[in-house]
Amino acid sequence: MKSISVIIPAHNEEKYAEGCISSINKAAEHYGGTVEIIVVCNRCTDKTEEIAVRCGARVLKNYDRCIAKVRNTGIFNANGDIIVTIDCDNRMTDGTLSEIAALLETGKYIGGGSPIRFERYSFPLRLNDLMCRVSFAVTGLYCGIFWAEKATFQAVGGFVEKKAMEDAATAKVLKAYGKRLGKKYTVLRENVLINSTRKYDHMGDWLYFKLMFSNIGTFIKAAFGDRQGLDRLLDKLFYDYNG
């Protein structure tokens, strides 16, 4: 059985690290092969590292304000034949690693993503869910949990190092690389990513709809090269968020 390394980027995730790692450990038991868990602590000042070590994870450090670089720190220091990535506030279902290994074993797939399901639902969250499903179905750029052989990530240079939308950009690169090799970029059929709703719990379920309308000027400026406002917004929502 091929060994698997699961990469978890983490910035002050002491509230969520144990739940995420626990879900991976359950999936590892279901898989039965060797599974390495790597938590990449990004500017952590809380107990994330302590919790990760206690739960059996290997800890690396990274100080970039770029989630792709954080993931790449884990990917290029991993020992596994297969790379799987998951964010620290999310959880995987029990059969995730087994299904990933089985799909790659067929030789038909370069890698893929996973369906995303929120840990709770409301009307605006169902709208978000619908938007994600439609976007994935139309583009085929499935995100959520990313998975591929380590050799594949090495061949494409890891995650595309963008501060935002790195997931879609990386899916696009993997899909194109797979096409050249006669392989498909796909999505898990039997397992899902359980997506955290912590930002919605903290800032309201209409969060991203409100952000789109209230920051139109910021997005327009960014489109024309002025990214200062967008970078401040990204820091607030992701790189400095501790909710």
Image (tube, helix red, strand yellow):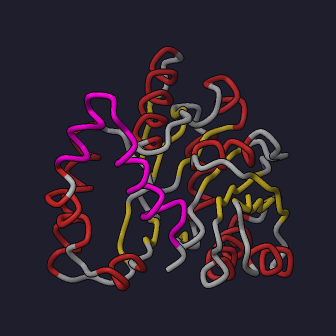
| Position of residue 188 measured from the top left corner of the image (x, y, whole percent) | 45, 54
The chief SS type of the magenta part is helix
Location of residue 95 in the rendering, given as x and y in whole percent from the top left corner: 57, 67
Q: Residue at x 29, y 46 (%)?
A: 136
In the picture, measured across the screen, residue 51 lies left or right of residue 154, that is right
* Vertical relation: 105 (above or below) 201: above
User: Would you say 17 lies left or right of 169 here?
Assistant: right
For residue 190, above or below residue 3: below
Determine if the magenta segment contains residue 67: no
Residue 54 pos. (x, y %): 85, 81
Residue in view at x 77 percent, y 59 percent: 38
Which residue is at a point 39% across and 76% down the rendered structure image? 199
> Looking at the rendering, which quadrant does residue 73 occupy?
top right
Look at the image and give the residue range highlighted in magenta. Answer: 217-241
Q: Is residue 229 left or right of residue 53?
A: left
Tell me if residue 233 is in the magenta stretch: yes
